[in-house]
């Protein structure tokens, strides 16, 4: 499901314990604290009594899921239907959290992120929804969060302070009357970063054509060139129209007392409102008479090679989200038709040589969209793309879907729904139920999956899926065929147009108006830098240190042996599901094979094996397991960056009854994979290269941070070779030259597998109860018996980090500026107080300087127990100014002087990052990670004690360490060609990320 939500900050899924018996005392049609109970019933899919209320006076809707879960959730959502690309709902989402009547600080949200025990705190904008979820395991904290969020949405300060829109949305900025006017604003720069992604641009252009007459045809997040058209008047009227309780949907989840929740919401907020007779309706888009065809462009740097850089997609508007049977059927169809390894559309496009990767999404909104998209294609492929896809679908309709494939897809879907491997169950309920609640007035609809699941299983014995493909794809005129092709220099044209617009605006100003704009700019920056008064800060409710347990949550491991193989057992009830991990030591590989180990993770399970074709193997994994994944990790032992324990992990899960089959399939994959199938290997390499390139293009912050770490850390160099720009260059060269070097590639893959998958080179790890353990070891023993028994020896790796200080040029419209080093290399030791330091820098200094004043989407830091430190900006319009702000950190620390209340707030916020809820599988994985890092309970307890004892003076005393780190002057920037060229003198070298 491809459903886009834009979160407020940078930060999922459904198994629930026994329900709380709160519902029994509530009777339908009775009124409780102003709320009339409309419907209640036990929903077995969430194992809880669910109660649906309407607030009599205000018209607000409230749905309570009374689950026995201490991780309580409050969420208030509004149906929002923007009319323009201004990003009004998105900017509103940011703005209402910038102060309210009862909490008059500049940003209650930021104060809460500094110091609450929240387990989830965010706000999100979708195409038809703006939603405000908070969660906490502490009752007092939960009601505090609820209070702040309700006040934010209903008593916002935006009516009294236009500066909020200027900061969060957009404003003209002029530093000097002789300077240039620029646009600044958090959302403005966030969306410039978001639309640096070609796929985001493709979705935007497609939706504009598919929905010319309703809200789904505009960008709720905001299109960068349109955001400056938002006026203050329109902004205020938007809040008046959509943020009334009659248009609100309140979800309560967990074990909090329902009477107390309803009384609080009623007495403090809803009782002050009368029902509105204005209903927010989203009309259906009238279907087309025939498929539309379009071609659009996206920017790439001047001189870029445009071959194989286009995106082609077909989009079909299919029914409505309230038809849950249809939606579940199409979730199966997307897999069976396109996403499965042997899906007919995937194979047909591969055979036709169109593009390098194909994907399919079914997005559920009032009118659903099915999208089939191919990446790395060419504009001239558009007609053939449609022909090949339609031919493949026609063949499927004529011959029928492979029933074993369908069975496997449904089994995996059912496994996920029943397992519920997420700690944030309330969040997922919120996302699952809002479509039915919005558009069918039925909050139960999206939760009760048993009926649509039973319906889709009929596809195993009927032609239901085939008939749906005929009706909703082949015979559907409400469709679009669109190509998005690269245009070198387009961003320069866009920037020139914006500059001309700004020049014209400045030219229209009188001398006095220019002087006033300079003064307004200075005044806004001064306002942004102002600290909230102690009196205003005191209005934000806060816990005390007495509310925090001084004890660390420890997950003990039992070290066992099975068939001479070491086993790590995390013993906890897991609903008869075995969560298995096999860790293979990468240090047996020669250094030249390190990137081939990463390549293995993209190939394992997708090539033919001795007994299965890759399609049959995909089916077997779907039918018998809950998943199969592989990945690399570089564990740092004893927090010493020179002591690395690199592993390739093989992760799978299955019910106890399927343990033997799970290991049979793992054995099949690890020991009998046919790497010498040249055609299939080339196809997978091509796809993997395309996905790696997409990652490099769309994840500037990850690319920059990985690159930075490689400048000073051996583990950083390992990560760069396996998941960074170096790996992208490796896999691109491998793919481009495959025909000439295929024998060598195959040989190295085989050598990598032979060295790794050895019984003397594996540590098994299992999360399950003691009762399930025998079934696990029985399967494990059979598996290890098939592994090589040859003696293994460790290779010698040599990493020599060098500070490169590179500028990484891309088509991004914003920058990701990172700087750092390792403080242990400078002679400093780690202690837990550095976690509080990080909280202060990320939530105070960098938040203010980089985001609030600088206009970036985010500014933050990281201090690791290994000694690694980084400072980072996210979707940043600046570059040199950001580095200057980093250099100003020691001065900030030198004058830091927080009182005991403020320090308590920072300490609580620090602890909340450590004490989040976890599922049983997450607990097991945490235990295994601690084992390989050689982390002890005593170390963690000492760290926690240090956090709780941190003083303002402790923070101030760390300024020398921070200064020494920054004085190493090691940084990396991923950003736009223009900005990096403008600052090229500060880099040792600049390079184009993607040619």
Image (cartoon, rainbow, N blue to C red):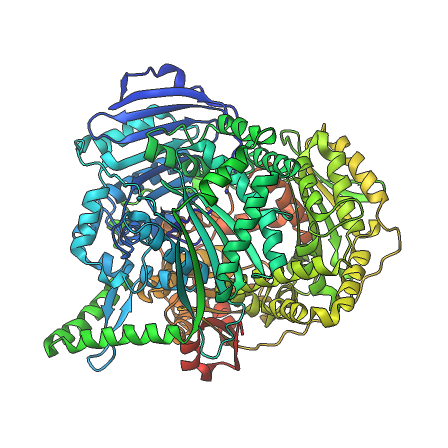
Out of 924 and 306, give the one closest to the viewer.
306
Determine the residue positioned at 58% across, 46% down: 941
Determine the residue positioned at 26% across, 67% down: 525
Using residue 4 as the reference point, say whether residue 671 is left or right of it: right
Tell me where residue 693 sits by quadrant. Answer: bottom right
Percent across and percent down for residue 285 are 31, 44
Tell me where residue 596 sits by quadrant. Answer: bottom right
Out of 97 and 740, give the one closest to the viewer.
740
Using residue 927 as the reference point, say whether residue 327 is left or right of it: left
Out of 993 and 408, give the one closest to the viewer.
408
Percent across and percent down for residue 945 are 53, 48
Using residue 162 as the reference point, say whether residue 695 is left or right of it: right
Give the farthest residue toward the right.
790
Q: Vertical placement of 408 versus 938: above or below?
A: above
Q: Which image quadrant: the C terminus?
A: bottom right
Q: Vertical placement of 176 versus 257: above or below?
A: below
Is residue 140 in view from this perspective?
Answer: no
Is residue 231 in view from this perspective?
Answer: yes
């Amino acid at each position: 499901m491809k459903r886009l939500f834009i979160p407020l900050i940078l930060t999922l899924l459904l198994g629930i314990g026994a329900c709380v018996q709160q519902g029994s005392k509530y009777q339908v049609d009775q009124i409780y604290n102003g709320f009339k109970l409309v419907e209640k019933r036990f929903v077995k899919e969430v194992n809880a009594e669910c109660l649906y209320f309407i607030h009599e006076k205000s018209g607000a809707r409230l749905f309570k899921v009374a689950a026995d879960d201490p991780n309580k959730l409050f969420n208030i959502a509004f149906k929002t239907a923007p009319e323009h690309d201004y990003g009004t709902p998105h900017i509103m989402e940011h703005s209402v959290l910038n102060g309210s009547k009862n909490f008059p600080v500049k940003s209650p949200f930021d104060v809460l992120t500094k110091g609450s025990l929240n387990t989830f705190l965010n706000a999100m904008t979708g195409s038809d929804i703006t939603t405000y979820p908070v969660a906490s395991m502490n009752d007092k904290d939960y009601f505090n969060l609820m209070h702040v969020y309700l006040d934010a949405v209903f008593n916002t300060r935006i009516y009294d302070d236009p500066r909020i829109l200027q900061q969060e949305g957009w404003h003209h900025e002029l530093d000097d009357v002789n300077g240039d006017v620029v646009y600044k604003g958090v959302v403005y720069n966030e969306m410039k970063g978001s639309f640096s992604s070609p796929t985001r641009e493709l979705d935007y252009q497609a939706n504009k054509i598919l929905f010319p007459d309703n809200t789904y045809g505009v960008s709720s997040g905001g299109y960068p060139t349109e955001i400056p058209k938002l006026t203050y008047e329109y902004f205020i009227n938007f809040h008046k129209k959509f943020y009334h309780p009659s248009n609100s949907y309140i979800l309560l989840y967990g074990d909090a007392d329902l009477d107390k929740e309803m009384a609080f919401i009623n007495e403090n907020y809803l009782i002050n409102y009368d029902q509105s007779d204005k209903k927010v309706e989203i009309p259906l888009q009238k279907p087309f008479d025939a498929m539309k065809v379009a071609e659009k462009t996206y920017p790439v740097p001047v001189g870029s090679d445009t071959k194989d850089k286009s995106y082609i997609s077909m989009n079909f508007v299919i029914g409505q989200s309230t038809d849950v049977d249809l939606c579940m059927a199409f979730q199966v169809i997307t897999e069976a038709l396109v996403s499965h390894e042997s899906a007919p559309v995937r194979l047909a496009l591969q055979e036709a040589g169109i593009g390098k990767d194909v994907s399919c999404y079914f997005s559920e909104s009032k009118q659903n969209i099915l999208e089939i998209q191919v990446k790395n294609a060419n504009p001239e492929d558009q007609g053939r793309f449609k022909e090949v896809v339609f031919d493949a679908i026609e063949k499927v309709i004529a011959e029928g879907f492979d029933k074993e494939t369908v069975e496997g897809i449904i089994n995996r879907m059912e496994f996920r729904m029943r397992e519920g491997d997420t700690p944030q169950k309330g969040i997922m309920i919120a996302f699952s139920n809002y479509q039915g609640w919005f558009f069918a007035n039925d909050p139960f609809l999206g939760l009760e999956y048993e009926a649509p699941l039973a319906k889709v299983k009929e596809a195993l014995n009927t032609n239901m899926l085939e008939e749906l493909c005929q009706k909703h794809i082949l015979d559907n005129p409400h469709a679009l065929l669109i190509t998005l092709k690269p245009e070198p220099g387009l961003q320069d044209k866009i920037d020139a147009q914006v500059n001309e617009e700004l020049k014209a605006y400045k030219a229209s100003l009188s001398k006095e108006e220019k002087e006033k704009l300079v003064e307004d700019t200075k005044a806004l920056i001064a306002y942004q830098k102002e600290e909230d008064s102690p009196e205003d800060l005191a209005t934000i409710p806060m816990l005390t240190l007495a509310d925090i347990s001084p004890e660390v949550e420890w997950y003990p491991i039992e070290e066992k042996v099975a068939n001479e193989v070491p086993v790590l057992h995390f013993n906890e009830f897991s609903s008869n599901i075995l969560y298995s991990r096999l860790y293979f030591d990468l240090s047996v590989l020669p250094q030249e094979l390190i990137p081939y180990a990463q390549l293995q993770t993209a190939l394992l399970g997708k090539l033919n094996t001795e007994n299965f074709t890759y399609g049959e193997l995909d089916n077997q994994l779907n039918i018998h397991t809950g998943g199969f994944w592989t990945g690399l990790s570089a564990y740092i032992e004893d927090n010493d960056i020179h002591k690395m324990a690199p592993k390739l992990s093989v992760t799978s899960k299955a019910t106890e009854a399927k343990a033997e089959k799970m290991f049979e399939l793992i054995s099949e994959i690890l020991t009998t994979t046919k790497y010498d199938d040249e055609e299939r290997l080339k196809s997978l390499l091509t796809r993997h290269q395309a996905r790696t390139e997409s990652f490099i293009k769309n994840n500037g912050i990850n690319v920059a941070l990985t690159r930075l770490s490689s400048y000073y850390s051996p583990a950083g160099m390992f990560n760069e070779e396996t998941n960074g720009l170096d790996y992208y260059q490796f896999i691109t060269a491998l793919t481009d030259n495959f025909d000439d070097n295929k024998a060598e590639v195959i040989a190295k893959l085989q050598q990598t597998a032979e060295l790794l998958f050895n019984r003397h080179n594996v540590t098994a790890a299992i999360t399950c109860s003691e009762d399930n353990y025998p079934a696990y070891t029985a399967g494990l023993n059979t598996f290890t018996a098939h592994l090589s028994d040859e003696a293994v020896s460790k290779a010698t790796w040599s990493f020599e980090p060098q500070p490169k200080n590179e500028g990484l040029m891309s088509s991004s419209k914003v920058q990701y500026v990172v700087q750092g080093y390792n403080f242990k290399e400078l002679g400093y030791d780690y202690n837990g107080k550095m976690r509080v330091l990080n909280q202060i820098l990320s939530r105070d200094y960098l938040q203010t300087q980089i985001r609030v004043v600088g206009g970036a989407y985010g500014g933050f830091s990281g201090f690791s127990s290994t000694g690694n430190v980084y400072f980072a900006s996210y979707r940043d319009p600046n570059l040199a100014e950001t580095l200057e702000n980093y250099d100003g950190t020691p001065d900030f620390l030198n004058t830091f002087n927080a009182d005991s209340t403020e320090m308590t707030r920072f300490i609580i916020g620090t602890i909340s990052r450590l004490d989040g809820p976890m599922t049983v599988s997450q607990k097991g994985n945490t235990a295994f990670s601690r084992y390989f890092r050689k982390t002890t309970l005593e170390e963690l307890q000492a760290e926690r004690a240090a956090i709780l004892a941190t003083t303002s003076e402790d923070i101030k005393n760390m300024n020398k360490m921070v200064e020494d780190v920054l004085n190493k002057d090691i940084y990396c920037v991923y950003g736009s060609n223009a900005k990096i060229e403008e600052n090229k003198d500060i880099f040792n070298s600049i390079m184009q990320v993607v040619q």
